[in-house]
Amino acid sequence: MVERNKTRDTHLRFHELKSLLTTIFVNNGTAAETAEILAENCAGCERDGALSHGIFRMPGYVGSLRSGWVDGLAVPDATRLGPSFIRVDARNGFAQRALAAADPLVRNALRETGIAIAAIRNSHHFSALWPDVEPFALSGYMAITAVNGLANVVPHGGRQAIYGTNPIAFAAPVEGAPPLVVDQASSVMANGEVRLQALAGKPVPVGTGVDRDGNATTDPHAILAGGALNTFGGYKGSSIALLVEILASAVTGGQLSFENDFTGYPGAQTPKAGQFLIAIDPNWGGSTGFETRLAHLCTRLIDAGQDRLPGARRFANRAAAEQSGIPIAQGELQRLRTLAGEAP
Amino acid sequence: MVERNKTRDTHLRFHELKSLLTTIFVNNGTAAETAEILAENCAGCERDGALSHGIFRMPGYVGSLRSGWVDGLAVPDATRLGPSFIRVDARNGFAQRALAAADPLVRNALRETGIAIAAIRNSHHFSALWPDVEPFALSGYMAITAVNGLANVVPHGGRQAIYGTNPIAFAAPVEGAPPLVVDQASSVMANGEVRLQALAGKPVPVGTGVDRDGNATTDPHAILAGGALNTFGGYKGSSIALLVEILASAVTGGQLSFENDFTGYPGAQTPKAGQFLIAIDPNWGGSTGFETRLAHLCTRLIDAGQDRLPGARRFANRAAAEQSGIPIAQGELQRLRTLAGEAP
């Protein structure tokens, strides 16, 4: 996790940060509508303390755009194939724009049929997944999404990378409280965390990954230099990575993680992959008082000793940022202004 | 895992074992149609070497039936609420009968809309989950299912049982090979395995569970006597248990795992819970050659060093049993005959 440098922080309002990021996207070949969606997403991650998907990612977005690997001008093709089935070709654009194109179709399907699937392919997802599901929970729905990526995770017992970090996220509404929002990689550690350990010259825990020869290592440099991460939880986590791979790539008709290859695009960082989303209206499932029941479940989880509910820290950070602004180090802000083409 | 006692095995044909089990179910208050479904399922687990859900479970089925906790005569109420949404009230009967009632509705929905959900509540699931998804994969669909149960698993960081072992299963077709079929508990170990370790007087691995006071223990007796299991893979596995709990109980309107209470039903063992199933036609998702692509993925997994594909061992056992019959110890067979009311 990227730590904030509290001593040198300045504070921006959300709309200020979003505006700055929008300028960066537009100035690097992104359509205005897409730029606004990505800036909202990235500024939201920064605001909520999900820093590994906040402004930390901007050089990667810019690198991919400048290399031509991702098309910032792509207009996604979203079709409602059936009453509950939405298929989206992102046309080599960003997944967030594709999901935004699917959103009204998904919501129509939910209202009319209680269930909706969005199968998105040819999409670049370079952010967290929780922003994709939280809005559905805020509307009273349960949503689940999964994304594959660049092959940098070995299957359990294996020695070569096959899976991406293959995150899965879900969200559900809770009466009288923020929604439950889970977002987790299927790897034992996020790739960004390994990079930070490497920068700090610190080893990673036993079981984190393998080197380029498939041998277990605690050296973050060896994991990054042609090695790979392990899945979380042994063979069971490996099964979750497999589930994500099948849903996000094979079902959608997207690329499998190991089919990603941007060697011809220097500077590219975004994985060209697929995304699968399912949203459910729990009232159709036979539930009465779904949100009340989840509140009961949450109370029991805390009473049982679980230290916090999934997503709670992000909502707390968001509330603090709404009060005091989003803390950003001066140097980071300067780098963003440079990316935006503003005079220093 | 229950081990076969090879030295005293006799061999039964599948139809012989199924017929014996059907008699046991019928003689203990199960409707003929339900008895056949349960016998097919249980004999199939035994045949495939999934022994912890084979004939090992018969005393538990019988105990629950005799106690009146489960209704062997229940006729499930399955309704297609919308083009892709099937809701089932199992009416306190077995989940397998409820799923059988939903099956034609699910398949109609798949043919017409590419996606189907079955939300089953008031159901007793006492078997493995793979038999519920494998048939969809054999028909070219991808299917996922989840079941909650009796609270015997603590959330990560907690000290009291909230979740059931909350298994999740999925299956997908593979060109030129048996389908991929994953079936795994969200607990670090299955409850049946803990019982076997207790019988053998052996400790369980560090991290398996807690005692009745919520303290970590490697004593299987302490886990069984009011203690609980941990989730697999730390907080990430705990999130999977949460996802299963929400889908299988809260979405379906079924009981939460910790709401299960059969103290008034001596001998009862089956959890009264909910089940969630989703099936997808990958052709609707944008995939072309889904089964070919999964065959490619499977090849890569094996090439990367994964030792076998999920479900492969069961298919190998099945093939062996079709050749040589299902190996069963003489003592086990005698116990089944006694349960069936046959003279010794």
Image (spheres, coloured by chain):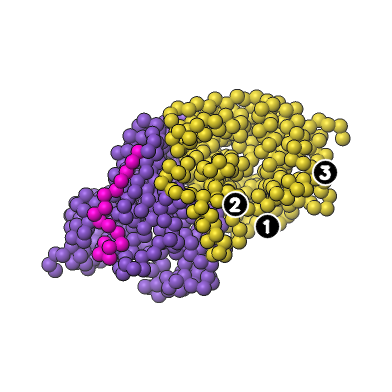
Chain colours: A purple, B yellow
Residue nearest the viewer, comparing A280 with B228? A280
Instruction: Please name the amino acid that badge 3 sits on.
Output: Gly
The total of numbered circles placed on residues is 3
Q: Which stretch is magenta?
A: A65-80
Mark 1 vs mark 2, foreground winner is 2
Mark 3 vs mark 2, foreground winner is 2
Mark 3 vs mark 1, foreground winner is 3
Q: CA distance from mark 1 to mark 2?
A: 39 Å
Q: CA distance from mark 3 to mark 1?
A: 27 Å
Q: Which type of secondary structure does the marked residue at label 2 adopt? A: strand
Q: Position of residue B8 (x, y in %)?
A: 83, 50
Judging by the rendered image, the residue that carries numbered circle 2 is B177
Q: Is A218 on the left-hand or right-hand side of A67?
A: right
Judging by the rendered image, the residue that carries numbered circle 1 is B203
Instruction: Please name the amino acid that badge 2 sits on.
Output: Ala
Task: Identify the mark nearer the N-term, 1 or 2.
Answer: 2
Q: CA distance from mark 3 to mark 2?
A: 36 Å
